Image: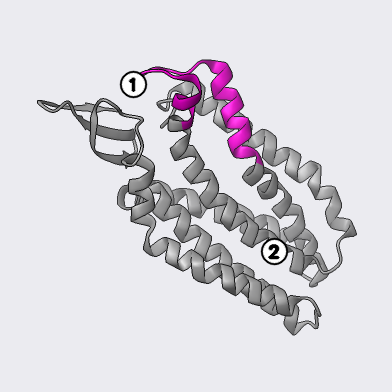
Amino acid sequence: VTFYGNEISIGVMLATWLLWTGLGSLGLGRLVKRLKRPGMWLSAAVVLGALLLISTVLGARLLKEVLREVEGGSIGQVRPFGTMLVSSLALLAPFCLLNGFLFPLVCRAAEEAGGSLGSVYLLEAAGAAAGGAIYTFLLVDWFAPTVIACGLACACCATAVAIAYGEWRRGAKLTGPLLCWTMCVAVPSALVVAYARDLEMLSKDGLRAWDPLLLVDTADSRNGRIAVTNTYRSIAAAT
């Protein structure tokens, strides 16, 4: 949205995503061998990932307003490459580092529980393919990005509770408080989903990024995000 979805911005964000995810897997992944009760750490990491997911999506939606306050600019202005790169690196770093750390942590937890590492690779690939297909052909046409992010966050919290419960069944002493903590996070996340539409309106209508134009409505599509603005006498569409 901030950089108008051109090829350069998409390439920068994809490269940044791969960079931080790789560093998270390579750097933080080395820590998993030292962890005791990796399932407990996995449960906590999934909850943290849910919070970072919502924060990243909202941060991306608010980035245009932040840059306008810091650098100035007018409607339709394409930001320079340096701003694009620095913004992508800063915005995606927390979630992508954790995302990269999750895979070796899942492998370690599966190994600790007596599972197969091959099944972890298989399920990860199948989940990525299914998630991409569901988002592309279903979710993007029916739900706003903040609604999707909040729904995924609730699913992550439910997964964390299931993992913590499994650790508790295996005799972990520290997962009792962790289980209560994840449930406390899951309840507010459910409330966030209930008001996700309001968050969507706040991130697009409550800002001054379109001044002096009046933003009528926006919608996501397979061809990008479409915004309809009102110049008080006429209506213009922009992508």
Element type where label 2 sits in the image:
helix
Q: Which residue is pictured at 58% across the width and 17% down the height?
A: 82
- Residue 93 in the image, given as x and y percentages of width and height: 65, 39
Predominant secondary structure, magenta span: helix
Q: Quadrant of the N terminus?
A: top left
The image quarter containing residue 97 is: top right
Identify residue for label 1: 75
In this rendered view, identify the residue nearer to me: 180 or 45.
Answer: 180
Residue 202 drawn above or below residue 216: below
Residue 44, disc: 2
Please state the total of marks drawn on the protein image: 2
Q: Which residues are magenta?
A: 66-93
In the rendered structure, which amino acid carries the disc numbered 2? Ala
Residue 100 appearing in the image: yes
What is the three-letter code of the residue carrying label 1?
A: Ile
- The answer to whether residue 53 is magenta is no
Residue 226 lies, in percent from the top left, at 29, 34
Residue at 57 percent across and 63 percent down: it is: 156
Q: Farthest residue in the right direction?
A: 34
- The residue at the point 62 percent across, 73 percent down is 161
Q: In the rendered view, would you say 141 is above or below 195?
A: above
